[in-house]
Amino acid sequence: MYQRDESKFKQRTAILIDGQNIYLSAKARGAKPDYSVVIDSMVSREITRAIIYNVSPEGIDQSKFVQFMENLGFEVKSKTPRRLPDGSIKADWDMQIAIDAFSLADKVDVMVILTGDSDFVPLVYALQSKGVKVEIVSFIENTRPELISAADKYFEVTDQMLIYD
């Protein structure tokens, strides 16, 4: 039987970025994420969808960031955080990321998810059960071992992927 040589075909790839997780992890290093490096590293793949899930606090103009991401080819989904009765602030994208990832599963070969959030471990397994290879890109110091081991591939965010102030 003929085996398809995957290296000769562009892998259909979706990129999903947990914007708040990556931003806060980069900020802890005194940097900002350079998302253009992420796109540049995917040149051998067919990017079918690229989405960043952005938290947009009231009173902060993010129009330049949104325009920059759109120019890179990302769809930007934004949400304003809400204040809970206990005074804490919530702007969680986990459920929407999971819904979008699962809805894209039959359209891609690879799902690249930028997050260190271990809440996504069940999503990784669900995508794999549908035949999707899952790659996680995150800051090692903010990533639980179970997320790393669940992924088909894991890539640590390096200094080349950051912009230092």
Image (tube, grey):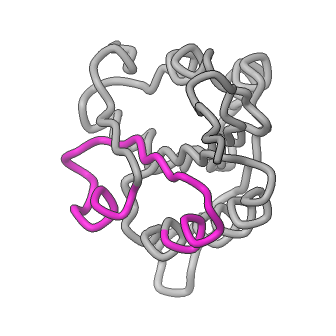
Quarter of the image with the C terminus is: top left
Number of numbered labels in the structure image: 0
User: Which is more toward the observer, 66 or 149?
Assistant: 149
Rendering coords of residue 155 (x, y %): 34, 37
Q: In the picture, residue 17 is in which quadrant? A: top right
77 vs 157, left or right, is right
User: Which is more toward the observer, 40 or 3?
Assistant: 3
Q: Is residue 29 above or below residue 139?
A: above
Which residue is depicted at the point 56% across and 25% down?
A: 7
Rendering coords of residue 12 (x, y %): 72, 37
Which residue is depicted at the point 68% across and 42% down?
A: 14
Q: Is residue 56 visible?
A: no
Magenta-colored stretch includes residue 111: no
Q: In the picture, residue 147 is in which quadrant? A: bottom left
Query: Which stretch did the figure color magenta?
Result: 125-151
Which residue is depicted at the point 34% across and 24% down?
A: 31
User: Which is more toward the observer, 3 or 138?
Assistant: 3
Rendering coords of residue 115 (x, y %): 44, 50
User: Which is more toward the observer, 46 or 65?
Assistant: 46
Rendering coords of residue 58 (x, y %): 68, 49
Q: Is residue 15 above or below residue 146?
A: above
Q: Is residue 147 above or below residue 17?
A: below
Which residue is depicted at the point 68% across and 60% down?
A: 101
150 vs 52, left or right, is left
- Residue placed furthest toward the front: 1
Q: Is residue 48 above or below residue 35?
A: below
Q: Is residue 104 visible?
A: yes
